[in-house]
Structures are given as C-alpha cells and as structure tokens.
Image (cartoon, rainbow, N blue to C red):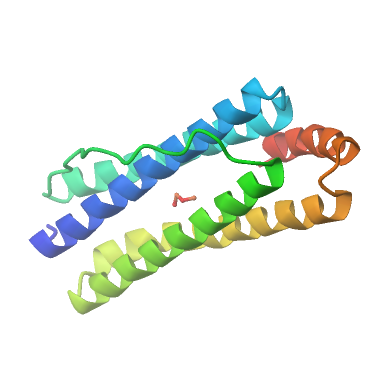
Amino acid sequence: MISKIIEEALNKQVRVEAESSQIYLSMACWAEVKGLEGISKFMYAQSDEERQHMLKLVKFINERGGHTKISDLTGPPVEFGSFKDMFQELYKHELFVSESINELVRVTLEEKDYATHNFLQWYVAEQIEEEAMARTILDKINLIGDDKGGLYLFDRDIQQLTVSS
Ligand code: OFO
C-alpha cells in the first residue's frame, strides 16, 4: 500500500513520462517532414519507450492501492531548429527527467517506502543509460559537423542505434 504522498509524487512522474513521450513524438514528426528518416525512426522509438515508462508507473500505482490520475499535458514545441539543437534539447530533457526521478527517490526515503524505492531503481538505471546515449549522440554530431554531408551520415548511422537499442 502506498501513502497519499507517494501516490501524488508517482502521479507527477506519470505526467513527466507522458510529456516526454509527446515531446519525442513531436521531434519524430519534425524530423519526418524534413526527410530525416533515420532520426525520425529513432525518435518514434524513443517516444514509445517513454510511453512504456509511463505505463510501468501507472500499473505500479494502481497495483499498490493507489489511483493513477491521467492529467492534462503541456504541448511540446513543433519546431526544433537544427538536428543538433534537437538532440541538445533531448539531452537537456533527459537531465530534467533524471532530476525528477532523483527527487522521487528522495521522497520514498523520507517516507520510508522501501518497496517504491526498490521499484524506482529501474528508472535510476534507465536514466543513466539514456543520459549516456544522448551524450554519445551529441559527441557524434560534434564529430561529423552540422553540414549536409554530416547530416546524411548521421541520419544513416542513427538507424543502427535504433536497431541495436
Ligand atoms: Fe527518458 O525518461 Fe523515461 O524514464
């Protein structure tokens, strides 16, 4: 059984994950209409992953005697500048998500809710991976440059990242 404080804190995270999914879906659309097929596929997959993160929380709350409240979401941007800007935005967003998870972990310790604390370790590990992936992508972009040729190679390479992740 989770306390009201934990229920509320987890519900907040449901919203964060749902908004992440929408932001990445918007990035997928932006890349798709620009003809960046690889980047777009990658972002559709990221959006799906974030929805799975959200659902995992939804199930946990309901199964632990809480009630998930599905809330309004803040609409994501429609335009993302250059592909480099877009991935910088993604990195920034993942840092924000990590902070949000860390805060949630802090609340579980304060509330002495060790079951939820244990459940959240999956998210802690996931954020380490996602931050690392975003940094790898930014390193790659810096290496190949922001020009047309670089973009072509990057769009091709990122398809392999999608397959292997
Ligand atoms: Fe990438 O954020 Fe979910 O956890």
Observer-nearest residue: 60 or 150?
A: 150
Residue at 29 percent of width and 46 percent of height: 15
Observer-nearest residue: 18 or 122?
A: 18
**In the rendering, at what x and y percent does residue 44 appear?**
56, 30
Residue at 64 percent of width and 60 percent of height: 132
Q: Quadrant of residue 5?
A: bottom left
**In the rendering, at what x and y percent does residue 133 appear?**
66, 54
Quadrant (top left/top right/bottom left/bottom right) for the N terminus: bottom left
Quadrant (top left/top right/bottom left/bottom right) for the C terminus: top right
| Left or right of 73, for residue 121 | right
| Left or right of 57, for residue 135 | right
In the rendered image, the residue lying farthest to the bottom is 110
Q: Quadrant of residue 21?
A: top left
In the rendered image, the residue lying farthest to the right is 149
| Left or right of 134, for residue 9 | left
Question: How many numbered tags mark residues here?
Answer: 0
Residue at 56 percent of width and 50 percent of height: 90
**In the rendering, at what x and y percent does residue 124 appear?**
45, 63
Q: Taking 132 as reference, is 29 above or below it?
A: above
